[in-house]
Amino acid sequence: MATVIFSTAQRRFTNDEERIEIEASRVDELIRVLYARYADLDGELEHAAVSVDGVLHNDALYVPIPPGAEIHFVGAIGGGSGDAVSEALNDRTSDPLACARAWQDSGRTVAIATVLETWGSSPCPAGSQLAIDDQGRFEGSVSGGCVESAVIESAQAVMASGVPTLLEFGVADEEAWAVGLACGGRVQIYVERVESAA
Amino acid sequence: MSDGNSERKFKQVGSRPIRHDGLDKVTGRARFGADYTLPGTLQGVFVRSPHAHARILSIDTSKAEKLPGVRAVITADDFPNVPMKWIPSGPTGIDFGASSRTVMAREKVLFHGHAFAAVAAATREIAEEAGKLIEVEFEVLKPVLSIEEALAPDAPILHEGQEVQGAGDKPEGDSNITNQVLFEGGELDAGFAEADVVVEGLFETPMVHQGYIEPHACLANAREDGTIEVWASTQGAFGVKSEIASISGADPNSIKVTPTEIGGGFGGKIPVYLEPAAVLLSRKAGRPVKMTMTREEVFRGTGPTSGSRMWARIGAKADGTFVAAETRLEFESGAFRGSPVGAACMTILTPYEIPNFRIFGLEVVLNKPRVAAYRAPGAPIGAFAAESLIDELARKLNRDPVDLRLQNAIEEGGRAKYGPPFGPIGFKQTLEAVKAHPHYKQELGPNQGRGVAAGFWFNAGMQSSATVSVNDDGSAIVRTGNPDIGGSRASMALMAAEELGIDVTRVRPIVGDTDSVGYCDATGGSRVTYATGMAVIEATRQVVDHLRARAATIWNIELDSVEWQDGNAVAINGSAEKGSMSIEEIAKQNRMTGGPVVASASVNPPAAGPGFGVHVCDLEVDPETGTTRVLRYTVAQDAGKAIHPTYVEGQYQGGAAQGIGWALNEEYLWDEEGRVENAGFLDYRVPVASDLPMIDTIIVEVANPLHPYGVRGVGETPIVPPLGTVANAMRDATGVRFHRLPMSPPRVLDAIESAGDPSKD
């Protein structure tokens, strides 16, 4: 049995309970049990630092819980803005299609941009994809950043109209210096709205 | 993890070798951020807002682009539009949208000096000239310049639709409040009802800058093959890589960041300001681009720490026992959310057992530079209020201020105000050390006063990697990814030397780039000697195992029959007749025994266990001018274990010096339009060597069980107590309690004169 002690802020989600005893051998298991018990707590704990018997773990999901341990979930010990961390970086390299699905499932409009063909030096090969949602969020890459902003902008129009479009970027374009591929390549990108399966 | 370090006899650790980078630094050969260049490098500059708050209606860069010598001009349109969103991550969180808008304003300029365009040209002069040719249409908005203005019901809103994070009752509708924090324990009213004495005060601290000596600088080269090379003066090269990827939309795998030597950071070189813009300028121009800030730009455009307004009260029984405390902390976050108010709330009362408490904090955004981390972020500010009040309690109860703190000091098993219990900590030992020090017994003269205050900081763990290799002459190389700011190279070398059993001069410590070392979180949070040191020890122990195995091969005996002692493999058990073999002899045969000896280790340890510090300050106030001279200053702090005592002392002294400046002189001055009026070291007064006495240090060592040698972090705790320490000394010298920083000569003079004239009270 581990004893979990909730802070004042957390008690908003725990029916004002301050401490409970839970059988769990690891922090992830403990979090699952807590979410099952307190639905409102869902999503609040994964990123918290966790104190196990006074030892504070920042990345605690798989930390074992010894029998009789006292557990606290502690909020961010922030140093202010700008603490760049690996996790956010990992987010950026996740699968654009999975992301598009998740966004669509949460009721947002989503577009996919796909590299059809490339000539010369271009950062992303044919088949590379970028998912974009109606709030300007994006995942994946079609050019390593060179033309992303233009693709995202164009995707907004595609999402609104439903009409797919074919974009071309290269040094020959007048746009080259604004959004182009300074590296000298050319790239053709197809942008389409993701239609719901239903 | 601990190997009974209290009994361990160290041979290298605890010695004071000359730092490996010392010669280069004192002879001017060390290469800092601005010292790097490549053939064809362009100079990049930012174009900065003349307004503190304005909507950007349009930007026309065409004239600037036509100026001969100009090779690229960028605005927010060249950056991906990253939405403002708080992503909880690691020990804090990050908002890449806010980071993007800090580098380059998008919808609005939010503080005077906020960059809204950047130019790369053949020379800095041409780039600056081009900047003047950029035509911007601004809709000038009313700036929000104080906490009071930010909280006013009719305040202009900086970010429409931004949600309030955190705890407590939240404001309805749009607000400039971006975060709220609440910690409670016991029964507040009942607690105060028990109190025989209650002290209370309203305190204010100004926004202050970290004041690192080296301005921000970088060189970026976006190459034709899509790869990006960056040299940057930064506390964390991996963080720069991640932020370039997120802000400029580049593939993280294409980016290599090399950290240069760094001339101070104190948290302010964790965020990026230049690098994503330099990368986009370089990509657009097809040439390397170098960006360096002027001191004025550093003050206007980079991370200060929060100004604050704090109300607090503390109640004690007649016997000195603290029974209740309540605080309300209001912090300026600058143009975007992310202030250290949370850390301030977590630290403010944590050194003391107080059964009944309520700690509430909030942050507001306003039209000032976005705050960045600054050495124990938030903690010095909170401690200023709490330690001033505890000093008042000691006066009212007629108690020695150290004794009163000893009576209420938190001990092992006691709970932090944010919940968890403490492991072994050295607060009481540190207080005792101060009491026993000759400084505390020295007589004071007229117009002189003595102050004492304490402070607490968490000390981080986080991710670190190290690679240790043995050269064929038996010397070793230790490679980590943590820029060396406070002498960490020497500490890494000492720990590797300790494990290898060789002299520290035989170990060469290297700070690697993001392609050549395993991931390391930033040099910050007082974490490097603890966490990166742990990776170094771990990797070196693996190397030692390899060396034992190599010796076993040479001797043709079992690995179990080889021990490692003082840099030698020693044959034991039935093989003792083989004698011993030095690391040099083993390394010479590496080729025969399996090739080079190399090992790496990575760790993500829990927070290091907290550091407590207690400071004593004697000062003298000139009653005619209000000028303050610090006569004597002593820092006592629990280091866990001092790996390189000189650099531990250096951290203690540096933290004290910065805190003294914060207490006595430092502040941003703003005009009514929100322009910084003192953006330079002539008018923004940091202490220089001639302003300060030699700062005494006492290293207390209560081993941290989480580290093999007992190390705690030491870098941040020393800046937590000085604000209160100096204020308490000032109270002692003048009879006046100062609630507002800095205690600069005009304020001191005014306060003394008002105190002497009851009609002005």
Image: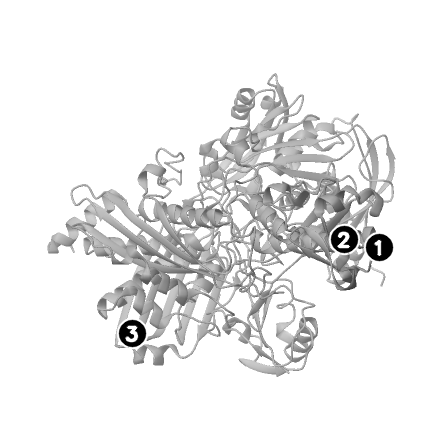
Give the alpha-carbon distance from disc 3 to disc 1, as whole Å: 70 Å
Query: Of callouts 3 and 1, which one flags the residue occurring earlier in the amino acid sequence?
Result: 3
Query: Front-most of B559 and A174?
Result: B559
- Percent across and percent down for residue B249 are 70, 42
A161 left or right of B266 in image: right
Give the alpha-carbon distance from disc 2 to disc 3, as whole Å: 59 Å
Asked which quadrant contains residue A196, the reply is bottom right
Query: Of callouts 2 and 3, which one flags the residue occurring earlier in the amino acid sequence?
Result: 3
Q: Amino acid at mark 1?
A: Asn
Q: Amino acid at mark 2?
A: His
Task: Tell which tag, 3 or 1, sits nearer the viewer.
Answer: 1
Density class for disc 2 (Cα within 10 Å; few <14, some 14-19, many ≥20) is: some
Density class for disc 1 (Cα within 10 Å; few <14, some 14-19, many ≥20) is: few
How is the model colour-coded?
one colour
Give the alpha-carbon distance from disc 1 to disc 2, as whole Å: 15 Å
Helix, strand or loop at label 1? It is loop
B43 left or right of A99 in image: left
Report the residue at 25% width, 77% height from top: B318
B528 left or right of B434 in image: right
User: Which chain does the residue under circle 2 lie in?
Assistant: B
Where does label 2 land, which residue?
Answer: B546
Residue B171 seen by the camera: no
Where does label 3 land, which residue?
Answer: B320
Query: Front-most of A130 and B460?
Result: B460
Quadrant containing the C terminus of chain B in the rendered view: bottom left
- For the residues labelled 3 and 1, say whether their Cβ atoms are less than 8 Å apart: no
Instruction: Please tell me the numbered disc located at residue B556.
Output: 1
Q: Is residue B92 above or below residue B183?
A: above
- Percent across and percent down for residue B623 are 16, 45
Task: Tell which tag, 1 or 2, sits nearer the viewer.
Answer: 1
Helix, strand or loop at label 3? It is loop
